[in-house]
Image (cartoon, rainbow, N blue to C red):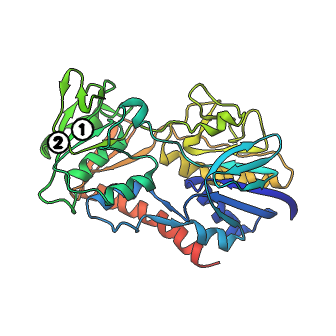
Amino acid sequence: MNDARLLLIGGGHAHVAVLADWVRSGLPARRATLLTPHPTLRYSGMVPGWISGQYGRDEGLVDLAGLARQAGVELVLDRCARIAPDRRMAFTENGQEIAFDIASIDSGGVGRARAVLGEDPRVLDIRPIAEFVRRLHAQSRSDRIAIVGGGAGGVEIAFALRNASAIAPRPEVLLVAGNDGLLPGFSRSVRRRVRAELAAQAIGLIEVDARIDDGTLIAGDAALEPVDLIVAALGSAAPEWPRASGMACDTDGFIAVDRHQRSILHPHIFAVGDVASRQDRDVPHSGVHAVRAGPVLAANLRAAANGLPPGKSYRPRPASLYLLSTGNGSAIASYGPVSAQGRWVARLKSRIDTSWIDTYAHISSHS
């Protein structure tokens, strides 16, 4: 074991896999720190199930603090404000300084609601997901809800809120998919199934961009009021601090990394998930890819800590399996051009989600 100082910035899906690797196989260095604002990770894939009453609010949590403890990693509950990559120093929002030799960043993206829609107290951004759950749990009754964003996240949240167990009678839900339309990038077969299910559940669908103008939610030229709650499911924006720290970033501000998840400018720094942008190929910002990149990142960090070049690269499959809950005990499966729908899909989704959580629950409580 060498004296390299390892620093994990953020408690995202990939860093969960790194911590699990360190529990199973031992720390690759004598000192390691996890810097994250929360002692748990909320698994975003189970949030729609919580909203619709399938799960309790805390069933989708991974115990980061427990994993860190079992791995022998120091836990610092704070948020990264900036780093000095050449000096190998991280600075937290509360003023703490953390020195490192090798760092890995999996801190996630930030919400885009303010930039895309504008200011309004009714807006609730789904990013960061932990804050979304906290605010939604505290939300007063909403009779009419607009979800802005037609991607997989927006679709699942729309179905979940239409079936929200804590709201009676069921709220009226409107999905504002935007000019890109419903589920861009998905097959016609999946879009057809989702359109039919939206209609069956009386969820309105509007496929023009939305904005907030003088307190009014507008799509195209039409006002959508009255609306009690506006949920922004607009994808991830880059946090400001990586670019401000002098790291190489793409045009949108995401940390530019190579096929090994290393910064293209600072090879002693790795980045993965929504905060990173692969420069060798297109890897969408999706929890599916963040989860699968985790073991690759763990292997490359172990190699780097031992002074070896990284040897692993995450290569996305030609198609990814997406399972979209419809909130009523069913789900829609998407795999490339193929789609399916039924309660069996919902059972498959539940089995995959809960087994992922259970794996890390077992590791965090048993060394």
The spot of residue 234 in percent (x, y) is 39, 36
Quick check: 342 left or right of 1?
left
Residue displayed at 54% across by 52% down:
291
**Residue type at mark 1?**
Leu
Asked if the residue at tag 1 contacts the one at tag 2, i.e. Cβ–Cβ closer than 8 Å, the answer is: yes
Q: Which residue is mark 1?
A: 175
Residue displayed at 71% across by 67% down:
73
The spot of residue 358 in percent (x, y) is 48, 70
**Residue type at mark 2?**
Ile
The reply to whether residue 256 is visible in this rendering is no
| Rendering quarter of residue 344 | bottom left
The N terminus lies in quadrant: bottom right
User: Of callouts 2 and 1, which one flags the residue occurring earlier in the amino acid sequence?
Assistant: 1
User: Is 173 placed above or below 356 here?
Assistant: above
Number of numbered callouts drawn: 2
- The circle on residue 342 is none
Quick check: 151 left or right of 284?
left
Whole-angstrom CA distance, mark 2 to mark 1, is 7 Å
- Judge the density around disc 1: few (<14), some (14-19), many (≥20) Cα neighbours within 10 Å: many
Residue displayed at 34% across by 39% down:
338
The reply to whether residue 26 is visible in this rendering is yes
- The circle on residue 203 is 2
Helix, strand or loop under label 1:
strand
- Judge the density around disc 2: few (<14), some (14-19), many (≥20) Cα neighbours within 10 Å: some
User: Is 135 placed above or below 238 here?
Assistant: below
The spot of residue 58 in percent (x, y) is 40, 68
